[in-house]
Image (cartoon, rainbow, N blue to C red):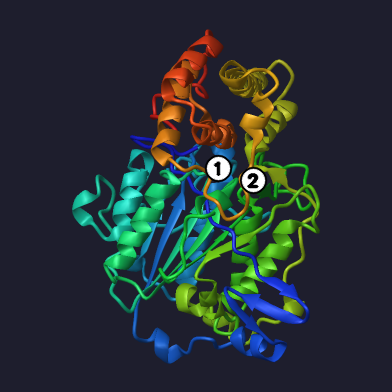
Amino acid sequence: MIRFATGVLLLSFLAISVVASCSRDLIGDVLRLPSEASRFFRSGGVSEDNDAVGTRWAVLIAGSNGYWNYRHQADVCHAYQLLRKGGLKDENIIVFMYDDVAYDEENPRPGIIINSPHGEDVYNGVPKDYTGDDVTVDNFFAVVLGNKTAVKGGSGKVVDSGPNDHIFIFYSDHGGPGVLGIADDLLEVLKKKHAAGTYKSLVFYLEACESGSIFEGLLPEGLNIYATTASNAEESSWGTYCPGEYPSPPPEYETCLGDLYSVSWMEDSDVHNLRTESLHQQYQLVKTRTANENSIYGSHVMQYGDVQLSKNNLFLYLGTNPANDNFTFVDENSLRPRTKAVNQRDADLVHFWVKFRKAPEGSPRKIKAQKEFVEAMSHRMHIDDSVKLIGKLLVGIEKAPELLNAVRPAGLPLVDDWDCLKTLVRTFETHCGSLSQYGMKHMRSFANICNAGIRNEKMAEASAQACVNVPRSRWSSLQKGFSA
């Protein structure tokens, strides 16, 4: 999980679904007859003449590090290659990634990253704009705002956009309810960008668990921002092309190669003329594939903000590969759903287990993999047990499950007081160790404690009682800062 000076790069979004009933299409607040809807979402919603006025900008963020999170950097590298083939210039693409995967000793193909079992290298040529410790939430916000003086380290490249420009942001990482900088901070940055008048429209694609919670009840209409998320506000997103899954990665790989939502939108974009495909059409395709036939191995892709922007063609944001000029998008040539996927939060366990299983008996590699697996599981048990005990200490045994597991109605933000959420998370981590990528799932519990009016003093007292002992492992370390 990405860590910043003040926390983890976190993300969550508002869910606005397209509802169809009585043979009519409801888009935003506008009710349209079928004939009108087809015109609303027809190909060519935006002309090439309009595109000629502005510049396309893109910000690509892989927020995690560690080889077991291979898929996030693979997603972002793939997105970069797609944009370059679409005609975007390097000067207009800004890439955030730790860059610790391509040459990791676990990578069976040093210097190469792939995003699918038979995929080509997507790492070659990717700009190293912000890597390692320069991958911070503050730098991300400064880059989006075009604030060169606020950037620390890295290439210094920012989104120096104008009023006629179009911006695409793609973020791939772990997540948790309300997480990405934190959600209200992200929304303030987007509002500032809009108030500055430095873009015509902005599209945000977000891959993370509970990613819907970043915008749920927070992203208003009127900012000319359209966002889609890999999951709703309550569920995990999914890794794909994982060991033991069909199709599996090449046998030498012991990690997931991609994320289901991310590869869905990119593999669709790879093969179609994006002048003929709208954001709405891609949203519907990705929604179907990511739901995975409504199986337990899928999530609900959501959309937020100014949904009417989804009539725009993808070409406006991603460009298009000239090699696809003859491949017009039609529903019948959409990609088929995968048959199985891996919960994002379990992808590290998959890596450690496959590594253990394949290593020779008694070898240092097998011993190391076993240690990694046990440490990860011990950390999970510690976090889960600690949060449950804190709930009981705060409101009693009977009321604790209701307090910790409550989900607010759709349309409401995760928490009323975001500063309270940040404070409670830091109080917990001070006494109990880092939440880490797995523990972000408990953000909703901390939000519920805030919404119940419980003060930080009581949280500190309960945390101190619950966490007498903290596992000594990298998962619990606060070396990279708090999670919020």
Give how far across and how far down residue 45 sits, in percent: 54, 86
Q: Which residue is mark 1?
A: 177
Q: Is residue 41 left or right of residue 453?
A: right
Quadrant assignment, res 193: bottom left
Q: Nearer the viewer, residue 280 or 104?
A: 280
> Badge 1, how many Cα within 10 Å: few under 14, some, many 20+?
many
Compared with 53, 235 (above or below) is above
Q: Could you tell me which residue is drawn at 58 percent across and 15 percent down?
A: 393
Q: Which mark is residue 234?
A: 2
Q: Could you tell me which residue is drawn at 29 percent across and 66 percent down?
A: 195
Q: Amino acid at mark 2?
A: Glu
Give how far across and how far down residue 65 sits, in percent: 48, 38
Q: Could you tell me which residue is drawn at 52 percent across and 55 percent down?
A: 217
Q: Are marks 1 and 2 in contact (CB under 8 Å)?
A: yes
Quadrant assignment, res 377: top right
Q: Is residue 307 left or right of residue 23?
A: left
Is residue 271 shown to the viewer in this render? Answer: no
Give how far across and how far down residue 270 sits, in percent: 60, 71
Give how far across and how far down residue 417 sits, in percent: 43, 40
